[in-house]
Amino acid sequence: MSDKQPVISIRNVTKRFGNMVAVDNVSIDILEGEFFVLLGPSGCGKTTLLRMIAGFELPSEGQILIGGQDMAGVAPNRRPVNMVFQSYAVFPHMTVADNVAYGLKIAGIEKSEIRHRVNEALELVSLGGLGTRMPDQLSGGQRQRVALARGLVMRPKVLLLDEPLSALDAKLRAQMQFELAELQDNVGITFVTVTHDQDEALSMACRIAVMNKGDVAQMAVPADLYEHPANRFVADFIGSVNIFEGKLTLDEPERAEVNCPGLGRVYLNHGVTGAHETTVWVAIRPEKITMTAPGKAKAKDSPAGTNIAHGQIKGMSYLGDITLYDVRLETGESLRVSRPNLSRWDQEDFQWDDKVSLHWHPSSPIVLLS
Amino acid sequence: MQDWNRQKPAFLALATAPVLWLLAFFILPLGIVWLYSFGRNVGLTDIDISGTFANYARALEPLYLEIFGKSVAVAALTTLLCLVIGFPVALAITFAQPKWRPWLLLAVMLPFWTNLLIRTYALITVLRTQGYVNKSLGFLWDQASSVKAFLGLAPLPTWEPLELLYNNFAVILGLVYVHLPFMVLPLYAALDRMDKSLIEASLDLGAGHLRTITRIVAPLAAPGIISGVIITFVPALGAYLTPDLMGGPDSQMIANVIERQFKRANDWPFGAALSFLLMYATFMLIALQALRTRKIEARQ
């Protein structure tokens, strides 16, 4: 990916609405052909950033370059990007084909070519043959495809998608996640998508920028966000996690130890960059904790007394593929543990109020400095 | 919600009074006037309802048809001007900041709270020969003249006040002024309902603001435009006060003719016939609109 040029360069962009800072000194390079996702909770500034790329909002400070060209003073209708709106914004008084042809007609493209390109775009989003329908005769999923085709037919440098799947039901959303990723791969156009749904982001994106309060909290490929979160916000926002505060008691190149009052001694098989006795946070994913009968826990590759905890099951939720357990530790803290339901008749079934022991591998805990 | 049909006593109790009121003071007088239109004057005060169509025949004479035609033309021009002025106003209110919107709407509606007669006289003081417009223009003219004199040039000729009142221009101006809110409010209602991202989508696809308005905003606001046109055109067609007070000898509209039949000419049957012709025309317009709406609903 390193040989690719950034198609969008966001440079130190700040956006203020009155006293409210919506986007705070953000710099992002989005590469050619990438499926880039802006992920964050509502109000984090992700949509504002997308609308600044489209030209519907102007940055208070900073620069946005598209294809190397500064977009300051360039109106939305003159930018080489197209947008798929959250509400789809399909023109209700035009047929599907007229909707898709709208931008081409405005651009003054020849009629025969318009017809050709519209058909091509409708085929691409599996709407072939529905060109004469009116939008109110379409389902939500079909309307979204019209919005997609209407943007793609313009062959933009970048297609911007604002919460593209949020209005669809769960089944259709899962299907569309795959379709969108495949579509992007086929057309080779850079996609920039805004979403608050981490599953959506993780499944579709090449790279994700996680945003929090106008700031980019971390920018990374999906697996890195999950396995190597940069801070507590990202660790907590992406997936489920147990976080404990502690003090760094040992830090060497090959090993480290954190003493967490709420969890016990946590041993790691790699170094951490932090001064002795620094306050740090330990994050452990629920699926990376092993639950056994009391006393049976055995933390591999860990010194005695580390990476082990004892408690009692205080809550269970059966989710089909996995079961989530809420374990009350002896320290009084709660720990969330998940177990895959590998067989249909689980041999050692855990029940409410069962006493359990827990252990984890020294590579599992993540040490966070902020 | 409860079905009204199941609560007949309550429904009747509530509906009887207004129905009786409408019967006694609206339907009945209207029926009497309708009967008069088929009658003829006998003496000074009596009307013989003989079933004659003579009044309608007379109403269709070229003299009255011409006034009818002129009224339609004036009302149409008023409606068009209201649309041209009102559309940008409604658009501006729609896109104003939310905290300003109620105040802007209030400003549009404020004239409704003042008596039409008072508003018309106020407009007259603005437009008359010694009115504010002419005084201001005259002042500027005099200043320009003295500047020219100061520069050693020949001074301007004496200021001749503009004839802004008692002509067709004044009638149109007055009617537009009075009817503008009727146009702005339905337009605003239609524009406000519209999904704003449709406008952004149009801009995003390369259309400029003008093409976005003609291709997206106007077609989607069409129902509002049509109801605005009808509720502006109908009262403008029957306008009486404005042409009476602000018009010249050639600016009388059909309502002025009708008024004269009932008063000075004392020809109630003929006035009644003219009134009903006006009403039939209005009804036809509304019926056409209803038909159109039903057709659109049937298509959906």
Image (cartoon, rainbow, N blue to C red):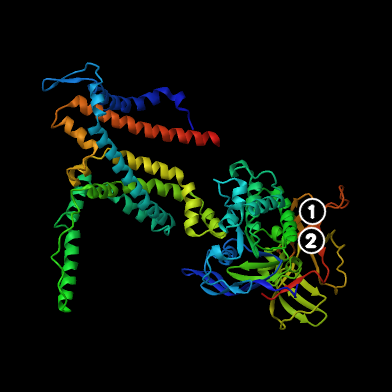
Whether residues under marks 2 and 1 lie with C-beta atoms below 8 angstroms apart, the answer is yes
Q: Secondary structure at mark 1?
A: strand
Residue at x 50%, y 70% (from the top left corner): A16
The picture places residue B297, in percent across and down from the top left corner, at: 51, 35
Residue displayed at 14% across by 30% down? B265
Which mark is drawn over residue B190? none
Q: Which chain does the numbered disc 1 sit on?
A: A
Extreme top residue here? B50
Is residue A86 at least partly visible in the picture? Answer: yes
Q: Looking at numbered disc 2 in the image, what kind of residue is underneath it?
A: Glu
Q: Reply above or below: A27 against A351.
A: below
Q: Marks 2 and 1, Cα distance to the nearest angstrom?
A: 9 Å
Please tell me whether mark 2 sits on a helix, a strand or a loop.
helix
* Residue toward you, A265 or B270: B270
Q: Earlier in the sequence, mark 2 or mark 1?
A: 2
Residue position for label 1:
A322
Q: Amino acid at mark 1?
A: Ile
Residue under numbered circle 2: A287
Instruction: Name the residue furthest left.
Output: B44
